[in-house]
Image (cartoon, rainbow, N blue to C red):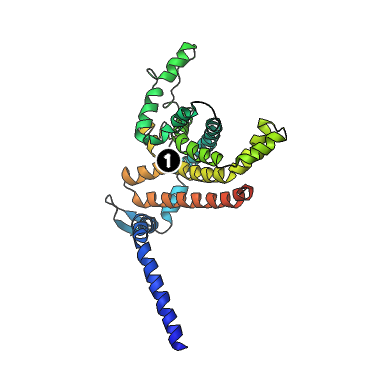
């Protein structure tokens, strides 16, 4: 009996070692690019640092107290939540509308599918330059169109009332390609017999949309909403290219605030504290979303 138990134990150890061998590349990558930076950030958030990022003085929670009493950080929190509120629903609604159109069996619809998904292949830098020209106060196409209708030119990126909205519009356009493709794939996975049964019963298009399409698409919608939600909190590229957090910090989202603290002000401790706060915010809101949103997901 003891021999049998010993053999079983050896077999389990061999199986475990073999599994760890296959997992080792992923474990190494996660450790180097995820776990180590995360714990390093947590460590730095409790210290003051010099310009090279080396720790100098342990300050405990003082960095956290400082950022929550800072008007600039509070402003960046407000801007970030507004940015998420503008971009996530806008991206989902526009992408869903385009996906429903592209899912129709019409001649030449493949061309429109390519056009709608094309933004996914454009880098953030290139797209930002494109929108920078559109938003230009004098030669930009948007203000030229307004001028045709006799409307006064708008400072899309220089007016504090318009800057965040303008960046949000460009972000929605950049994110449409990926979201559109995922939603289109979800639409095409819905069984056609559901629509055939509804047609036999004489159901209208609107009835089929809200009673069949949306419920059956809910797992895909839940995925794209979650991903878009997290990505919106982590937006940086277009902010840096278009406004650099201005004017008057009206587009200074948390990620850009972290960048400023770390690489412009060389306050790596304060930047790390902001990064931890951002991580906690995303984690809590994502858990809430899973808790509340998954109840409404309908799986086939």
Q: Is residue 160 visible?
A: no
- Where on the picture, by quarter, is residue 259? top left
Q: Is residue 25 above or below residue 6?
A: above
SS at circle 1: loop
The residue indicated by pointer 1 is 235
Q: At 66% from the left edge and 35% from the top edge, which residue is drawn?
A: 208
- Where on the picture, by quarter, is residue 11? bottom left
Residue 238: image location, x then y, percent: 39, 35
Q: Residues within 10 Å of mark 1 (few under 14, many from 20)?
A: some
- Where on the picture, by quarter, is residue 265? top left
What is the total number of numbered labels drawn onto the structure image?
1
Residue 58: image location, x then y, percent: 36, 60
Q: At 34% from the left edge and 48% from the top edge, which residue is drawn?
A: 267
Relative to the observer, which residue lies in front, 257 or 255?
A: 255
Q: Is residue 209 above or below residue 159?
A: below
Residue 239: image location, x then y, percent: 40, 35
């Amino acid at each position: 009996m003891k021999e049998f138990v010993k053999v079983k134990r050896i077999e389990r150890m061999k199986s475990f070692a073999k599994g760890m061998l296959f997992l080792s590349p992923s474990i190494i990558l996660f450790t180097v690019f995820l776990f180590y930076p995360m714990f390093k950030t947590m460590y730095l958030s409790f210290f003051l640092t010099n310009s090279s990022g080396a720790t100098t003085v342990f300050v405990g929670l003082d960095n956290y107290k400082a950022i929550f009493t800072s008007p600039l950080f509070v402003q960046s929190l407000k801007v970030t939540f507004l940015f998420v509120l503008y971009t996530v629903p806008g991206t989902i609604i526009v992408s869903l509308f385009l996906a429903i159109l592209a899912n129709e069996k019409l001649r030449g619809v493949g061309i429109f599918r390519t056009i709608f998904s094309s933004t996914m292949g454009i880098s953030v830098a290139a797209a930002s330059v494109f929108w920078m020209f559109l938003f230009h106060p004098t030669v930009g196409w948007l203000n030229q169109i307004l001028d045709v209708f006799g409307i006064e030119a708008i400072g899309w990126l220089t007016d504090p009332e318009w800057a965040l909205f303008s960046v949000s519009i460009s972000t929605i356009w950049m994110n449409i390609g990926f979201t559109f493709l995922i939603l289109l794939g979800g639409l095409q996975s819905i069984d056609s017999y559901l629509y055939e049964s509804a047609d036999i019963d004489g159901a209208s298009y609107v009835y089929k949309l809200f009673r069949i399409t949306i419920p059956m698409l809910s797992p895909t919608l839940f995925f794209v909403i979650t991903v878009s939600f997290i990505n919106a909190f982590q937006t940086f590229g277009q902010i840096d290219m278009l406004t650099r957090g201005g004017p008057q910090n009206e587009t200074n989202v948390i990620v850009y605030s972290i960048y400023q603290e770390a690489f412009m002000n060389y306050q790596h401790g304060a930047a790390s504290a902001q990064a931890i706060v951002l991580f906690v915010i995303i984690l809590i809101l994502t858990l809430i979303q899973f808790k509340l949103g998954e109840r409404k997901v309908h799986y086939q």
